[in-house]
Image (cartoon, helix red, strand yellow):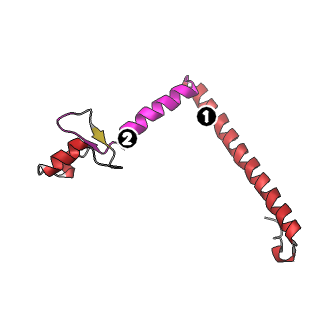
Amino acid sequence: MTNPIDLESLNVEELLALSQNAQQLIEQKKHQRLYDAYVQFEQIAEESGCSIDDILAAGEVLEKKRNIKYRNTQNHEETWTGRGRKPTWLVDALEAGQSLEDFEV
């Protein structure tokens, strides 16, 4: 890094200008970072013979499956991630004396 700026020696206008310039640079760097990531993503998609949409759709399905922590033993389509309100099937089972561990995936 270069020499640090003595902020105390700057007046209000200079500080505002510095702040605005810094904000513009931050936005440019964020945009460049996203662009670079997108280019890498395109390359991965091309190398795998898929489209970016295919990869994103597969990712959504995998993410949902990965996040499931509990499954209804009576109906395997009913699941819960462990976040938010407990589903009715789980509340009923817990009230009936079953433990949460009985439903862990």
Q: Earlier in the sequence, mark 1 or mark 2?
A: 1
Q: Which residue is mark 2?
A: 66
* Residue at point 52%, 31% (across, down): 56
Residue matched to label 1: 41
Image quarter hosting the N terminus: bottom right
Q: Position of residue 88 (x, y in %)?
A: 23, 43
The secondary element bearing badge 2 is classed as helix
Image spot of residue 7 (x, y percent): 82, 73
Residue 6, quarter of the rendered image: bottom right
- The magenta segment: 49-75
In the image, residue 50 sits, relative to residue 91, either above or below, namely above
Element on which disc 1 rests: helix
Give yes or no for residue 69 being in the magenta stretch.
yes
* In-front residue for pair 76/96: 96
Q: Is residue 20 left or right of residue 31?
A: right
Residue at figure coordinates x 21%, y 48% from the top left: 91
Q: Amino acid at mark 1?
A: Phe
Query: Label 2 is placed on what type of residue?
Result: Arg
